[in-house]
Amino acid sequence: MRDNDQIKVFATPLEAFVRLDTADASVIVLQNDQPTTQGMTDVPTIYFTKTGDANRGFQQKSDKLSDDGTEYVHTERQWKQTTWQFMATARQDPAADGNELTASDYANSAAMGLQHDDVLGVLAAQSLTVLRIGQVRSLHVMNGEGQFEDWPSFDLVVCHEAVTVTTTPVAE
């Protein structure tokens, strides 16, 4: 499964789950590295970016004659693990009462959402399996306004099969 296919499969149901779980309809899920302060959205945002692919097992290769006997069909299959990093931002007013959700709350909701039965069902229907979800970790930084920010993130590892099929005409 190609990267853009994976993105289409998990981004929409994840966004729906986080909106429902946090009771915040403004949450968005974007494919992007987490931006600097200048590029941050004004609404809580879950960002994700691909960090790598790993082949698992041996590549399977098979050849067969097409049903009509005019072509050789060569198929190569390889199981892959793709790792995605998810990060969350949520602006907070330091002078507020402290009742709003933190970026870590949104990251934890996204991690939980990727394990929810409804989301897993959507992924499974597209032959995408969640292998593991790492712990939510937080990096604390001081922003350009002298305020401390929490930059929580976690890794998602999915398993899928890459299939390549080529054909060669049968020589007469």
Image (cartoon, helix red, strand yellow):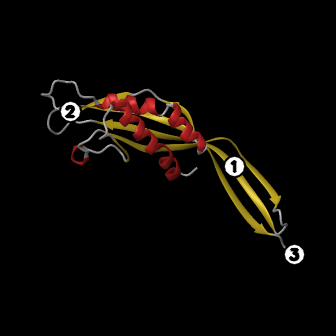
> Measured along the vertical axis of the image, is residue 165 above or below residue 13?
below
- Mark 3 or mark 1: which comes first in sequence? 1
The residue drawn where x is 40% and y is 40% is 15
The residue drawn where x is 50% and y is 37% is 119
C-alpha span from label 2 to label 1: 48 Å
For residue 92, side relative to residue 65 (left or right): left
Residue 68 image offset from top left, x and y in percent: 83, 66
For residue 89, side relative to residue 171 (left or right): left
Label 2 crowd bin: few (<14), some (14–19), many (20+), radius 10 Å: some
Q: Are marks 3 and 1 in contact (CB under 8 Å)?
A: no
User: Which residue position is annotated with label 2?
Assistant: 92
Q: Which tag is nearer the camera, tag 2 or tag 3?
A: 2
User: Which residue position is annotated with label 1?
Assistant: 77
Residue 169 image offset from top left, x and y in percent: 78, 70
Instruction: Work out whether residue 109 or residue 2 is closer to the camera in this orientation and state it.
Output: 109
Total number of numbered discs in the rendering: 3
For badge 2, the amino acid type reads: Gln
Which labelled disc corresponds to residue 52? Answer: none
For residue 167, side relative to residue 64 (left or right): left
Instruction: Work out whether residue 30 or residue 63 is closer to the camera in this orientation and state it.
Output: 30
Snapshot quadrant of residue 149: top left
> Measured along the vertical axis of the image, is residue 60 above or below residue 129?
below
- Mark 2 or mark 3: which comes first in sequence? 2
Residue occupying the far right of the picture: 172
Residue 34 image offset from top left, x and y in percent: 33, 43
For badge 1, the amino acid type reads: Arg
- Mark 2 or mark 1: which comes first in sequence? 1
Instruction: Work out whether residue 169 or residue 67 is closer to the camera in this orientation and state it.
Output: 67
Residue 16 image offset from top left, x and y in percent: 41, 39
User: Which residue position is annotated with label 3?
Assistant: 172
The residue drawn where x is 29% and y is 38% is 44
For badge 3, the amino acid type reads: Glu
